[in-house]
Amino acid sequence: MFLSVQQAARRLGVSPVTVRRWTATGFLPCTRTAGGHRRIDEHDIGDLARAIGNSNHLAAQLARERELDVLVDTSIALASRLDITELLAEIARRMTSLLDCHYCTISEYNPAAEAVSVLADYDHSGRRLPDTGPYKLSDYPLTRRVLEDRCTAVVNVDDPHVDQAEAAVLRRDGDKSLLMAPLVYQDRVIGLVEIVDQDRARDFSRQELRLCRAIAGQAAAALHNAKVFAEQARSDHDIERLRSALRSLAGSVPALVAAAPGETLSEIARAACDALGAVSCVASSGGTSAGAFGQAAASCDGGGGRGTRASLVVARDPGGTGDLTLAVTLTATPSEGQAELLDLIAAAGGALLGR
């Protein structure tokens, strides 16, 4: 229910002029009618009246200022974290501390797959918990509503009317209450934040929910920026690797040109290994093959080779003049431009063999 300025003033025990001043500065939220008249939600009036505590208006103003200070401080803290891992930990720390809860989970939302994937799960001491796998929204109707309607939702395990799928998870983990809020960036839902209280059912106040929504909005923007920064860093790293690879390849040209006919395949394999920082390379042509090992092979051997993820990249001479095939083993998925560089080496090597 919305009240006029005069009604709000009587409820708060102040003059209408004071109410107008509070609404003008944002101290007391309000909306306006089509005719421009202020209308104030009685819940906001109730919150302010409780903050005043029948003492003086300074207490209410200080309460609002403290909330503003928290939001400014949180915004600065989140905006300064460009490393995604550090950012996730900071979001969880802020949420658990400000809402006096035990756990915070930050997840990513995939609308196309209608699934949610956990990015990180922290307890209130900052300890990161083991990540859990993605889950389908079809199994959790309330989570779907939070994401699609962009609203907050509270689940108390002892409430018989709540989503039983969410309540079952709370019972399984021994928790009592869950608050969910969407992460929205530029009118697009990108994820979900979940805050869990392990000890008690919670009836979150309007101020707490407002604070949660505000921090979730800041977190969404910070996550987007951190991802853009990470992608740019990866791009810069890939460009530097390509520049290094081209320098290495340029240094290999004299040996390739001077190689004896029986050694050309070996030199091509060595040049490919060195340029791509590969574990090994096998060069094949006309039923003959030769191989080479790179510096990455030593690091794999040092670890016993166990748990090492490798990628095989194959390139063939596009001209077909030398019937050359290169098979290169990398320690990771090929970075930007590496496959194209191998194609270039295959084309150059094929031209040498076809002389």
Image (spheres, grey):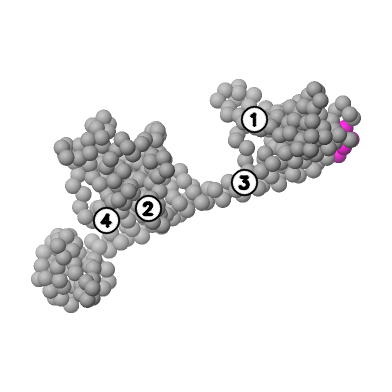
Q: What residue do we see at 25% from left, 47% from top?
A: 153
Q: What residue do we see at 29% from left, 38% from top?
A: 140
Q: Tell me the crowding category of disc 3: few under 14, some 14 to 19, or many 20 or more residues within 10 angstroms, Cα based.
A: some
Residue 237, numbered circle: 3
Residue type at numbered disc 3: His
Left or right, 49 with respect to 322, comes to left
Residue under label 1 = 312
Q: Say which of marks 2 and 4 sits in front.
A: 2
Q: What residue do we see at 36% from left, 36% from top?
A: 136
Give the image location of residue 132, x and y in percent.
38, 33
Residue numbers of the magenta segment: 254-259
Decide which of tag 3 and tag 1 comes sooner along the chain. Answer: 3
Residue 257 lies in magenta, yes or no?
yes
Residue under label 2 = 184
Question: Is residue 337 among the parts visible in the rendering?
Answer: yes
Residue type at numbered disc 2: Val
